[in-house]
Amino acid sequence: MTAPRYCPFYCEENVWHLANDPQVGQGPRHVLLISNAARQVALWQQRAGAAENGGLVVWDYHVVLTCAAKVWDLDSRLAQGVVLAEYLAQTFRGAPERFAPAFRVMPAEVYRDALASDRRHMRAEDGAYRQPPPPWPAIGQGHTLDALLDFERGEPGVVVDLPGLVAYLPGR
């Protein structure tokens, strides 16, 4: 497998490209936007996290791709295409409730149509990037990422908690 497009700290763009990558495999593809009302969600096995802490990172949000009950998280230390149950068990290890994940689940093609990012969320007040941007152009016109991360909105897709995700995805 050739390496997919990847830039650290730009998971929403990484997944936007990955969602259209034929190397991911056959079957329905879903994008999971992971966050919560406080915008503080704990994920283990993340490359940005210290090994001695199990790769723990508290992200404001994170985005991954599923296909055929497997997960592609380009920021994870786990294998790409890891089985969904293993990914969930390794990545969400019973953090305190305030760090518990919620998921917006949507078909990958819906995500590709819905996402636009002018990367404003990655800029400091002086306009400088907090993290170096990807080498590819920004996606779409304007900025819809904040709306997609507003889990009070029902659309697009569905918003579920961790048990709801397990119930929702297997038949998809």
Image (cartoon, helix red, strand yellow):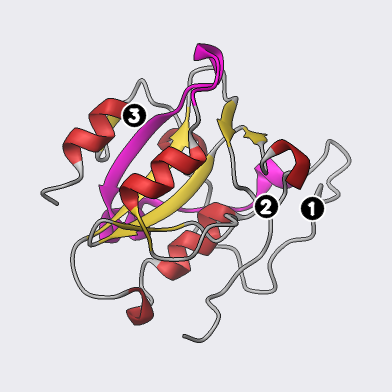
Residue 86 shown left or right of residue 62 in the figure: left
2 or 1: tag closer to the N-terminus: 2
Camera-side residue of 129 and 28: 28
**Residue receiving disc 1:** 131
Marks 2,1: beta carbons within 8 A: yes
The residues colored magenta run 94-122
The 10 Å Cα crowd at callout 2, few under 14, some 14 to 19, many 20 or more, is some
Residue 31 shown left or right of residue 58 in the figure: left
Which type of secondary structure does the marked residue at label 1 adopt? loop
Q: Nearer the viewer, mark 3 or mark 1?
A: 3
Q: Which mark is residue 162?
A: 3
Q: CA distance from mark 2 to mark 3?
A: 23 Å
102 is within the stretch colored magenta: yes
Query: Which amino acid lies under the numbered mark 1 shown in the image of this protein?
Result: Gln
Q: Number of marks in the image?
A: 3
Query: Which amino acid lies under the numbered mark 3 shown in the image of this protein?
Result: Leu
Residue lying furthest bottom in this view?
Answer: 2
Residue at the location (48% across, 42% down)?
90
Which type of secondary structure does the marked residue at label 3 adopt? helix
Q: CA distance from mark 2 to mark 1?
A: 7 Å
- Does residue 72 sit above or below 57 in this rendering? below
User: Does the rendering let one see residue 55?
Assistant: yes
Camera-side residue of 157 and 146: 157
Q: CA distance from mark 3 to mark 1?
A: 29 Å
**Residue receiving disc 2:** 9
Q: Which mark is residue 170?
A: none
